[in-house]
Amino acid sequence: MQITINGKPEEVQAGTVMDVLKQKDIDPHMVAVELNTQIVERDRLATTNVQDGDKVEFLFYMGGGA
Amino acid sequence: MSFTEEQITRYSRHILLPEVGGKGQKKIAQAKVFVVGAGGLGSPVALYLAAAGIGTIGLIDSDVVDRSNLQRQVLHHTPDVGRSKVQSAKEKIFLLNPDVNVETYEDRFTAANAMNYIAPYDVVIDGVDTFPAKFLINDACYFAGKPLVHGGILRFEGRVFSIVPGQSACYRCIFRQPPPPGLVPSCQEAGIIGVVAGIIGTIQATEALKLILGIGDTLTDRILDFDARKTAFREIRIKRNPRCPLCGDHPDITELFEHEQEVCQLHAPEALGIS
């Protein structure tokens, strides 16, 4: 199925948000995940399904400033 | 208050703008902005807000200027190496605009002093470089009801957004807590292209001015991410999270605390690739 990840259309296998993170080789502790503008808490990543056409945003931590 | 002839000349390009005018310039002159960190982000923020004629700029930083800061921390010049950052900053701001009252605090921003420090100010700017400090600033601004302009930078990337407590999404609505220690590197470990601090910092200053003037659409409920390699901005729509541990429907966080400072996992020589 096709979903939009960080603004780009991408082909992924159907499954949960956690499955998509695994396919993209992203450690779930390194990102905040938004699914269709709704934050998906870390404890719900493995139980929240991604559907064809969904918009997913992976927001990586950025802690610098000095 | 009224402006002198010199001030009218100094701020003439602002006063010309219908959205600012003499009335808006007075708002700017009466405003108080608190900048946490006089470094990469704090430098452009403080310089542009000073140039704009902000009445009072509060600066807190416990550090001294290091030679490695000069690549991006444009408040500090070569002769300032080894000097207090807030003192160095105060001098530059005075040279740029003596109208500005600069309050300096050579101190760490902690859970114990945060509320006292931000109380007199209208807007707070995040210019710090650790996750515990970023979460502390977010929480303190929420409890004090102060608008906050968040900023973060790393390598070639930067992020900025504004938070109006109780109205728009806060930092914890998105990032519940700091990442596990050692997983996300700091600029000290991973590097930062200096100009990104300037780009993100000047957007933070723009947001502060808009919040003070009450004009335009602020970066509330949307995160702006910048990638210098692509010269591309990406806007991510966000909204308040009912499960936010701070500003959600059933908050767990009811008082200020500091997340533990992560222990640096990379040793400097390794990070620099010279071990």
Image: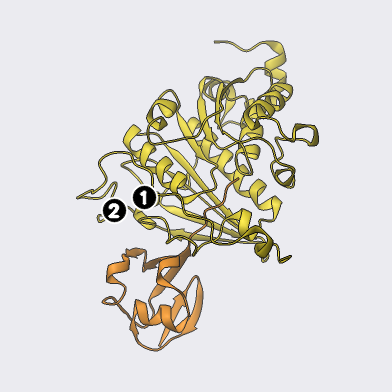
Chain colours: A orange, B yellow
Badges 1 and 2: C-beta atoms under 8 Å apart?
yes
Q: Which residue is mark 2?
A: B244
Give the foreground label among 1 and 2: 2
SS of the residue at dot 1?
loop
Local crowd size for mark 1, using a 10 Å CA cut-off: few (<14), some (14–19), many (≥20): many
Label 1 is found on which chain of the structure?
A: B
Residue B219 appears in the rendering? yes
Q: Amino acid at mark 2?
A: Cys
Asked if A28 appears above or below B226 in the picture, the reply is below
> Label 1, label 2: how many angstroms apart (C-alpha)?
9 Å
Give the mark nearer the N terminus: 1 vs 2: 1
Q: Quadrant of residue A14?
A: bottom left
- Residue B66 location in percent, x, y? 70, 41
- Residue B79 location in percent, x, y? 80, 32
Q: Which residue is mark 1?
A: B169
Q: Is residue B221 left or right of residue B49?
A: left
Instruction: Please state, as top left, top right, bottom left or bottom right, where the N terminus of chain B lies in the image.
Output: top right
Label 2 is found on which chain of the structure?
A: B
Extreme-front residue of the structure: B275
Q: Residue at x 68, y 65 (%)?
A: B229
Asked if B92 appears above or below B268 in the picture, the reply is above
Q: Quadrant of residue B141?
A: top left
Residue B215 appears in the rendering? no
Instruction: Please state, as top left, top right, bottom left or bottom right, where the C terminus of chain B lies in the image.
Output: bottom right
Q: Amino acid at mark 1?
A: Ala
Extreme-right residue of the structure: B79
